[in-house]
Image: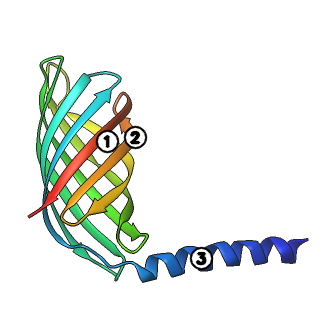
């Protein structure tokens, strides 16, 4: 039984690795527009600039920063570290975001942000979904980005 479980794990890891190795990496600069609903802030709208570089053929690392405005009249600045993996021959991506977001309201300005993202690529345009946490509650939203 243990041998079968080990074989299944090996097969799953090999399938994931072969998918990631076959996909090209996209690097450079992107302009990103986002619209989210955050449990504690209502609707949020972001305009961000992202910078990234490949660390492997299918994976790149980078960051994004910009400005945000909420429907509850809070102005802020999102700052995120980003790790992305291209899948399906570069037509789709999976990733993770982690970083501080600054919210200029009456409280302490630093808010923890962590999220998973996934989406589709069509040339220099990407469209994706982000699900995560923005202190003190959940956040979900859509992203539209243009490679510059």
Q: Which residue is mark 1?
A: 113
Which of the image's four quarters has the C terminus? bottom left
Residues at discs 2 and 1 in contact (Cβ within 8 Å) = yes
Residue 83 placement, left or right of 78: right
Q: CA distance from mark 3 to mark 1?
A: 31 Å
Q: CA distance from mark 3 to mark 2?
A: 27 Å
Q: Splitting the image into 4 quarters, where does residue 49 fall?
A: bottom left
Q: Quick one: SS at disc 2?
A: strand
Which of the marked residues, 3 or 2, is nearer the chain's N terminus? 3
Depth check, mark 3 against mark 1: the one in front is 3
Q: Identify the residue at horizontal 35%, vertical 45% (top origin).
A: 129
Badge 3: residue crowd in 10 Å (few <14, some 14–19, many ≥20): few
Q: Which residue is mark 3?
A: 15
Which of the image's four quarters has the N terminus? bottom right
Depth check, mark 2 against mark 1: the one in front is 2
Q: Which residue is mark 2?
A: 132
Residue 42 placement, left or right of 46: right
Q: Identify the residue at horizontal 87%, vertical 72% (top origin).
A: 2
Q: Quick one: SS at disc 1?
A: strand
The location of residue 134, given as percent across then percent down, is 33, 35
Q: Identify the residue at horizontal 40%, vertical 40% (top origin).
A: 132
The location of residue 67, given as percent across then percent down, is 9, 40
User: Is 54 situated above or below 114?
Assistant: below
């Amino acid at each position: 039984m243990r041998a079968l479980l080990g074989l299944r794990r090996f097969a799953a890891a090999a399938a994931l690795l072969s998918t990631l190795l076959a996909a090209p990496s996209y690097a450079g600069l992107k302009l990103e527009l986002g619209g989210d609903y955050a449990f504690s802030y209502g609707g949020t709208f972001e305009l961000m600039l992202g910078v990234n570089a490949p660390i492997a053929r299918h994976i790149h690392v980078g960051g994004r920063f910009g400005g945000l405005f909420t429907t509850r009249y809070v102005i802020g600045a999102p700052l995120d570290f980003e790790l992305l993996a291209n899948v399906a021959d570069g037509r789709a991506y999976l990733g993770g975001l982690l970083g501080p977001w600054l919210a200029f309201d009456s409280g302490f300005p630093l808010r923890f942000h962590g999220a998973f993202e996934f989406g589709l690529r069509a040339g220099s345009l990407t469209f994706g979904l982000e699900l995560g946490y923005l202190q003190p509650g959940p956040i979900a939203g859509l992203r539209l980005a243009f490679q510059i």
